Amino acid sequence: MARRIPPPTSTWVRGSANAGASYAQAASTNTAGAIRSFAFRERAAILDTNVARVLFRVFVASGDPKSHAMKRHLWSVAESLVPHRQVFDFNQALMDLGATVCVSRKPKCLVCPVAKGCRAFPFTPDA
């Protein structure tokens, strides 16, 4: 028997910031934020692996980036940074920055557009 998937206008996508977590635990908060941001151009934070790495290095730079407490902190950073306009462009730029410049191994700090304000600059993965 096939399960019915709610239409994109349902509250699991367009509801509160934590709406994704309440949808039968099938969609993560990040997925709900991405759908709201990219499909509906709504103001919503995202925190995929690339974005988390960028935010951790730029704003925190110490501690365990994978800990539950740090993930909560990074979500609050992400939510505070989301602009009221051009959310799609902002979120896409953060994801691209993490995927192409602020990569996990051998980051390209010298060409990074946010290096001047980055707490981890110059980042050395082995240190």
Image: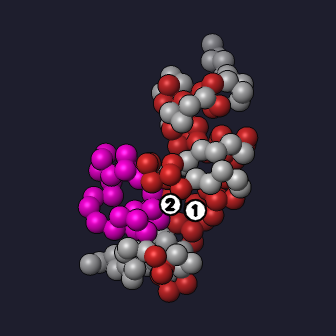
State which quadrant residue 53 falls in.
Answer: bottom left
The span shown in magenta is 52-74
Magenta stretch, overall SS: helix
Q: Nearer the viewer, residue 82 or 91?
A: 82
For mark 1, give the secondary structure.
helix
Give the label on residue 94, or none.
1
Q: Residue at x 50, y 33 (%)?
A: 18
* Disc assigned to residue 68: none
User: Which residue was labeled with disc 2?
Assistant: 50
Above or below 113: residue 37: above
Question: In front: mark 1 or mark 2?
Answer: 1
Q: Nearer the viewer, residue 52 or 87?
A: 87
Cβ atoms under marks 1 and 2 closer than 8 Å:
yes
Give whichever of discs 1 and 2 has the lower sequence position. 2
Residue found at the very far bottom of the displayed protein: 110
Q: Is residue 101 above or below residue 51?
A: below
**Vertical relation: 99 (above or below) 110:** above
Q: Which amino acid lies under the numbered mark 2 shown in the image of this protein? A: Asn
Q: Disc 1 and disc 2: Cα gap in Å?
A: 8 Å
Q: Amino acid at mark 1?
A: Leu
Colour mode?
A: secondary structure
**Residue found 43% across the figure and 74% down from its top:** 118
Image x and y of residue 114, in percent: 52, 75
Q: Picture coordinates of residue 1 (x, y %)?
A: 63, 13
Residue 29 within the magenta-colored segment of the rendering: no
- 83 or 46, which is in the foreground? 83
Residue at image coords 64%, 45%? 43
Q: Position of residue 63 (x, y in %)?
A: 26, 61
Q: Is residue 69 magenta?
A: yes
